[in-house]
Amino acid sequence: MIADPLAYAASALSGPLLLVLTAFVCLLLPLFIRQLRGTQGLIALGAVLVAITFFRQAPPAELAFFSEALLLSPLSSYLWAFALGVLALVIALSIARPPAPEENLGEYYFLLFMAGIGLMVLVAAGDLFTAFIALELLSLPVYALAGIRRSKPGLEAAYKYFMLGAFGSGMTVMGIAILSSLYPALTFTALKVGPAQPLALAGFLLVISGFAFKTALVPFHMWVPDAYEGAPTPISAFMAAAVKAGGVIVLWRLFSLFSGGPIREIFWWLAVVTAVSANLMALAQKGLKRLLAYSSVAHAGYIAVAFFGGRQGFEAVLYYLPVYAMATIGAFSVALLLEKEEKGPQIEDLAGLAKTRPWVAGAMAAFMFSLAGVPPLAGFFAKFYAFAGAVNSGYTSLVIIAIIMSAVSIYYYLKVTVVMYMKPSANGHTAEAPGLIEAVIFLMAAGVILAGIFSRPLLEQAAEASRWF
Amino acid sequence: MSAYALASAAFLLFSLAAAGFLTCGSLVRMLMFLELMLNAANIALVALGPETVSQAYAVMLFAIAAAEAGIGLALIITLASVFRTLEAENIKELKG
């Protein structure tokens, strides 16, 4: 047991509090000091890097605060480090190619930080209502960020995301209202024991569909392709890596309340329908960002398969999230590098990349193979552990479907690689390439390769964190 | 009015708002239906939940609904000035 939980909480919460402070600094300081305009990105990146160092030391036990609204444990430390890592990468991409005009950069970083804090609270939330508020704190800024350029594609992306996201929130609130009439409290521990009456089932269904909107499980994925395509590319990467991770953690908490029964069956169908339809729809895509959007939906399906593996499955999910995030952020960075119009490059625009930029093409091939799950890249081990857990728990048919669909997915990931290596370049690629984007690309490529070949350290971290669920 | 009658009315309002949201094509109307959904859920929460806690929740939900309306209206105003229309079927830049 820890000597002084309050002192620990103060030090653990100093990370998020630093982010709140920096958010306001980014928003307000450039208004008063002219020279600071345009440097918000550097301030933001510095603050995130400092915040990462704040919780190298995870708590030795689970500490509950505010009547179990917030749970700090090695699990929350792991996910906070993940969230801050994603935030740092997204900020680096935004510095390299500012997604908003200079006078709006303050708001841009403010909203990004608010979303990041929302994610941190969401993954540490111990009750359903806190999770809902954190989810709103995560998604409201992202709606605005998607449309921050005020261009046609950006605004269309923002309104589609907003309308469906808010519809999902409405369903979640209704579900919470129903559940609060049946359970004495809304903490996840209190929800575990209790009646499995039809009304409770309706409440859980509403809550789960609300969170499934954010995680982008089929049939709640309609907004994903448009939102990813129209939003600024760093924000698309944030949605794919961070927003999805938040939804996944809450869905896991809800899923693990049940050891059987209709809710599990609904998750079974969600996983199957997501894995099958997302991969089939991805086959027809021509835009790179749209392809990555459908790939992100498909990966949500694989993660839902991992849910069935019990504790081993959760360990796999915790390994899966950073591995998927590295590959997808890397791929979105390549899209950002080649971006000429706001919708991002078409897959055909990658033609000849192997000639003009062999290293970037090699990194992109690594991301694609990792997303497809080709050994020895990290994506293979992530899928392997995710599916192995489900097989061990006896869900073999589910895993067979997922494996067939991930074989289908190799087709469209390979298509990107073939275009890069086999097709001659039709028109030259843009000459100017901010070094920071390339740095992110190579960092992510190194991560995808190293986390695959030397998967032990990351897996051990994930296993340690999963023990604290 | 008993709590259950109030909750039933809230469920009805919620279903009507959800149906309206899914069938109407104007963004302003969709936003209004969204607010209606949130408010119906809020009424259900106050009617059904344990007294003090759910009222505290309800107050927080007002704030969230207001924030959502704020973002939604800001988006709609910008959309109206960029696209010159607020019918969902005319806002089609992205497809595939």
Image (cartoon, coloured by chain):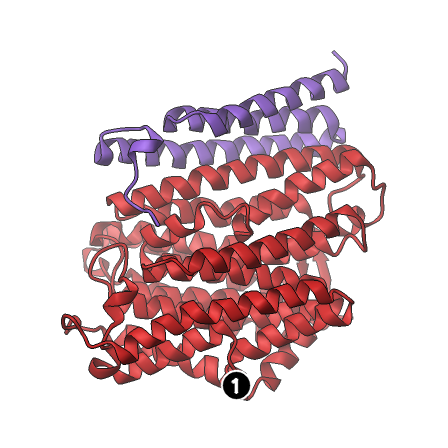
Say which amino acid is labelled 1.
Pro
- Identify residue for label 1: A376
Vertical placement of residue A210 versus A395, above or below: above
Vertical placement of residue A380 versus A97, above or below: below
* Front-lying residue, A141 or A13: A141
Residue B24, visible in the rendered structure:
yes
Residue A81, visible in the rendered structure:
no
**In the rendered structure, the residue with mark 1 lies on which chain?**
A
Find the residue positioned furthest to the top.
B1
* Front-lying residue, A67 or A416: A416
Question: Is A310 on the left or on the right of A350, as rendered?
Answer: right
Find the residue positioned furthest to the bottom.
A454
Question: Residue B45: x percent and y percent?
Answer: 68, 29
Q: Quadrant of the N terminus of chain A?
A: bottom right
Q: Could you tell me which secondary element the residue under label 1 belongs to?
A: loop
Colour red maps to chain: A
Question: Residue A205: x percent and y percent?
Answer: 68, 41
Q: Quadrant of the C terminus of chain A?
A: bottom right
Which residue: 34% across, 82% down? Answer: A362
Q: Quadrant of residue A43?
A: bottom left
Q: Residues within 10 Å of mark 1 (few under 14, many from 20)?
A: some
Vertical placement of residue A56 versus A287, above or below: below
Which residue: 25% across, 60% down? Answer: A98
Colour purple maps to chain: B
Question: Is A353 on the left or on the right of A454, as rendered?
Answer: left
Question: Residue A199: x percent and y percent?
Answer: 77, 33
Question: Residue B53: x percent and y percent?
Answer: 71, 34
